[in-house]
Image (spheres, helix red, strand yellow):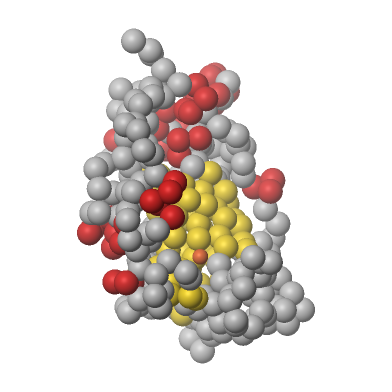
Amino acid sequence: MSDKPGYRRPQAGTQPDYLHPAYQSTNLRSPSQPLVFLPHSLSEITGPTIGAERVNEKDNDLTAQHEGEPQGERIIIHGRVLDENGLPVPGILVEIWQANAAGRYNHKRDLHDAPLDPNFTGTGRTVTDADGWYQFQTIKPGAYPWGNHYNAWRPAHIHFSLFGPSVLTRLVTQMYFPGDPLLEYDPIYNCVPDTRAKERLIASFDLEKTIPSYALGYRWDIVLRAVLPHRPDLAEPRRPDRGRHPWRARGDQWASSGWQRRCRQRRHA
Ligand SMILES: [Fe+2]
């Protein structure tokens, strides 16, 4: 038996089904053979340290990347990135991409008959702070049609990518908006079987974050996979200033740090 740490497997029903016939692409790309169990090895439990060095000052403000302001409803999206043990995950890269207010991506393969916005690229990135917080300012994306079925429209959504401390904590997902009438018709949203897990894909309106006369606020927390309890030392979040996983840190220098003591206190609180 390997003494290497593993990560928790996803709870049943919380992830999209590989095969969801209503989502037509899954009929072609889903596995046709029984899945093979793969133990978590070094290549999965470690990963590239991607963090602050990739992020520029205005990368998290999608309304300030061009000379003029983009069209649409300004919004602020913020939240915390936690692991399944409830610990914040600091110093990790969070990236988003989205359609503009008219429902058009700034991409050559998007042929939707809606206007492009010269002041909106639709991509942003940031790094979580010491307590796992992230924030973006952007505009609310529009719904757009797609060819999955007759009169198919994607609900307004923002794509998210997160690089956690290992390959197994990489997460690519979508955030939705509350009250969207298209959600019940969307096979991508509905391919998550567990109702509560599906509803966690919807952000909450946040009046506290709303800026008067300027922008609406939304809160969306994100939970990444956690290491198994038998190696709780690996549950330590990465050090914010260096973006390194504790498993790879040089022991003495880090083991005595105040940062690690605070982590222990939080974990045992
Ligand atoms: Fe999309």
Say left or right for 106 vs 151. right
Say left or right for 232 vs 168. left
**Residue furthest out toward the right:** 67
**Residue furthest out toward the bottom:** 213
Say left or right for 246 vs 2. right
Q: List x then y, in percent, for residue 245.
A: 53, 31
Q: List x then y, in percent, for residue 62.
A: 63, 70
Front residue of 149/5: it is: 149
Q: List x then y, in percent, for residue 224.
A: 40, 44
Q: Quadrant of residue 152?
A: bottom left
Residue at the (70%, 78%) spot, across then down:
119
**80 is higher (above) or lower (below) than 235:** below
**Residue furthest out toward the top:** 1
Residue at the (70%, 57%) spot, across then down:
56
Residue at the (45%, 39%) spot, across then down:
169
Q: From where the camera sits, is residue 69 visible?
A: yes
**94 is higher (above) or lower (below) than 44:** below
Front residue of 91/262: it is: 91
Residue at the (40%, 51%) spot, across then down:
26
